[in-house]
Image (spheres, rainbow, N blue to C red):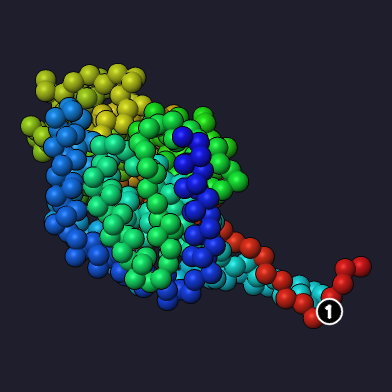
Amino acid sequence: MTEPIRKVAEAARAAARVVAKASPEIRSRAIAGIASAIEAHAQDILAANAQDVAKATAAGLSPAMIDRLMLDPKRLGSLARAVAEIAAAPEVVGRVDRTETRPNGLEVSRVRIPLGVILMIYEARPNVTADAAVLCLKAGNACILRGGSEAIASNHALLEAVQAGLRAAGLPETAVQLVPTTDRAAIAELVKLDDLIDLCIPRGGEGLIRFVAEHARVPVIKHYKGVCHIYAHSAAKLDDAIAIVDNAKTQRPGTCNAVETLLVDAALAPTFVPRLVETLAGRVELRGDAAARALGGPTMGTATEDDWHAEYLAPILAIRVVDGIDAAIRHIETYGSDHTESILTTDPALAERFLRDVNSSTVMVNASTRFADGGELGLGAEIGISTTRLHAYGPMGAEGLTTTKFVVRGNGQVRS
């Protein structure tokens, strides 16, 4: 298998040089063409996805995995619109982030450049095929896609749309490639090709990401899991707080930005917990500590130590009653995964303290954790979420797929 895998990476490296030198207009034309091709091939893409979903259902995949795998007309339409938005978004490559003139007259600038070849390894989520392709192109990169076997038909159907856009703009089809096998051994080979691949971004379960990290010689953007917290402070608006927690847990519970643990201030708990139990009854399984169970009634299960670490990706919510913001922050520091945390409060000073002292990749005030998403945060789309603080942190868009080089302009200076 080594030779075919290496040839894919070599073709990507050659294509990356072409894409990096292409004008912004050509790259934007390719991305706009991909959006049009997704719309034109919608029925073929949905038919392929229906095959994948049927096989996954028959194989007994979890509801969360099925939800991630499934495309419908609404989701596919949203995907096409997100791709079109990326085509129209401001240019990243060549952007000057900083310029200064040194005392000797040298003008020193930091300029955005592509990373090169990006390896995407992902499970389910066929939308990643399009998102990764267009974000890499926007940032002047080539990409290699290794999707899971459960989405193989969907990924190939989307790749046809992607390559149609590349052809229309005169860019090489090898700028976006699918690995020709879903064998996990191919991953181990790919992540060792540090002479050809510049960055690996795995998206999937914790087991997949740890497998990649253990075998990689190339840099890896890691995001093991999303244990997201909401802290309902004593000064929270009750109706708003209930609605936010409901949305954060139930809107799409199988996503990494769904809330998994709710921390309720002891002063608010007697009012808040019974109301929340009533609101989520029949839709969410609740597990609480002793204080939460005393207020929540017999339908609330017992939260164990494992629950505070859990990323459920399911309609399950762990609830803990805490004595003030210090206890809430200690809990997040102990059990959090550096993904997303939100405080619900009308106290602006306390909100600012939460924003300052909690160093997760996304920190919010009075908002659902479901907004921790590249599209919702203005990136157009995201290629992944990084909980590794080097290079990029949080949702990654096109800018996260670039780096900077120094550009120095002189007029005869020599160093003494």
Relative to 3, 349 lies left or right? left
Kind of residue sitting beneath label 1: Gly
* Residue 189 visible (yes or no): yes
Figure quadrant of residue 102: bottom right
Closer-to-camera residue (231/127): 127
Q: Quadrant of the C terminus?
A: bottom right
Work out whether residue 348 or residue 162 is closer to the camera in this orientation and state it.
Answer: 162
* Residue 287 percent location from the top left of the image: 22, 25
x and y percentages locating residue 379 in the rendered image: 37, 61
Residue 39 percent across, percent down from the top left: 20, 64
Q: Residue at position x 53%, y 58% from top?
A: 14
Query: SS class of the residue under badge 1?
Result: loop
Q: Nearer the viewer, residue 136 or 394?
A: 136
| Disc 1 target residue | 412
Q: Is residue 367 visible?
A: no
Q: Is residue 322 above or below residue 360?
A: above
- Residue at the location (46% across, 34% down)? 1
Position above or below: 410 against 216: below
Task: Name above or below for residue 144 compared with residue 313.
Answer: below
In the picture, residue 59 is in which quadrant? top left
Quadrant of the rendered structure where residue 337 is?
top left
Percent position of residue 143, x then y: 44, 53
Residue at image position (49%, 54%) is: 12
Q: Is residue 351 left or right of residue 69?
A: right
